[in-house]
Image (spheres, grey):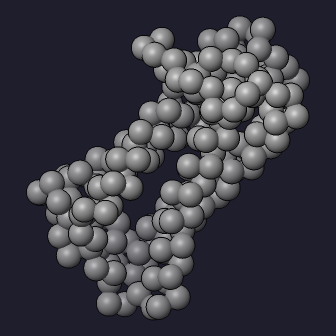
Amino acid sequence: MGLHSSTTSWGAAAKVLHWLMAIVILVDTYIVWFIVNQDFENFRDQSTQMFRLLMPWHKALGFIALALLILRLVWRQIDTRPAYPATMTPWQRTASSLAQNGLYGLIAVSILTGWARVSSNGSPANVFNWFTLPAIVPKDEALHAWTEILHDWSSWAIIAIAAIHAAAALKHHFIDRDNVLRSMLPFMR
């Protein structure tokens, strides 16, 4: 398997970026879910032990997801894309493209509103204590409330579209019996 994609399969770079991003987003989502379920009534209370322990991981993984998103978008511009299977109808191709672009857009919105949420609260945007990113908006309670809403809703939308994306990949594999899922699986040609 080469670094670049071919007309029939995704290349190593596209696969690594895809699966790394999926793992980072899944772990990041699980961290928040875990915090919420450990102390639902107080999960936004920054003094709780669970929040102090896990929220820095959530923030750092968000910035890692941003770096991966930028790499994916750059790679997408220079790499080829495997052809859609001949059996895919035009509406399925359109839906696939909309879902993929929608995921990219929602991931960007979620990350940027998360960053703005941290900034508008006056908290540092720290990445694993390696470095701190600058605030992207000033400290502002009203802005913080809006960024909180946008971050939460865009995150839920990512979960919904990613679930549809995964279901479509499984449909292609088990019902259509085409190469769509296999072409993105690691260690497959």
- Which percent across, then down, holds residue 47? 78, 8
Task: Look at the image and tell me whether residue 163 can be seen.
Answer: no
Q: Position of residue 152 (x, y in %)?
A: 74, 43
Residue closest to the eye, 90 or 85: 90
Look at 77% across and 14% down and name the residue there: 46
The number of numbered discs placed on residues in the rendered structure image is 0
Q: Is residue 12 left or right of residue 17?
A: left
**Left or right of 121: which side holds 166?**
left
Q: Quadrant of the C terminus?
A: bottom left
For the point 32% across and 61% down, the residue is: 76
Q: Quadrant of the N terminus?
A: bottom left
Residue 139 sits in which quadrant? Answer: top right
Q: Position of residue 118 (x, y in %)?
A: 68, 26
Residue 147 visible in rendering: yes
Place of residue 80 in the rendered image (x, y in percent of width and height, measured from the top left): 24, 69
**Which is nearer the eye, 49 or 113?**
113
Q: Spot the residue most to the left.
A: 2
| Residue 185 in the image: above or below residue 55 | below
Q: Nearer the viewer, residue 73 or 14?
A: 73
Going 50% across and 32% down the picture, which residue do you hit?
Answer: 63
Q: Which residue shows up at 56% across the image and 64% down it?
A: 102
Front-lying residue, 129 or 178: 129
Q: In the rendered view, would you say 108 is above or below 101? A: above
Relative side of 126 to 23, left or right: right
In the image, 187: left or right of 123? left
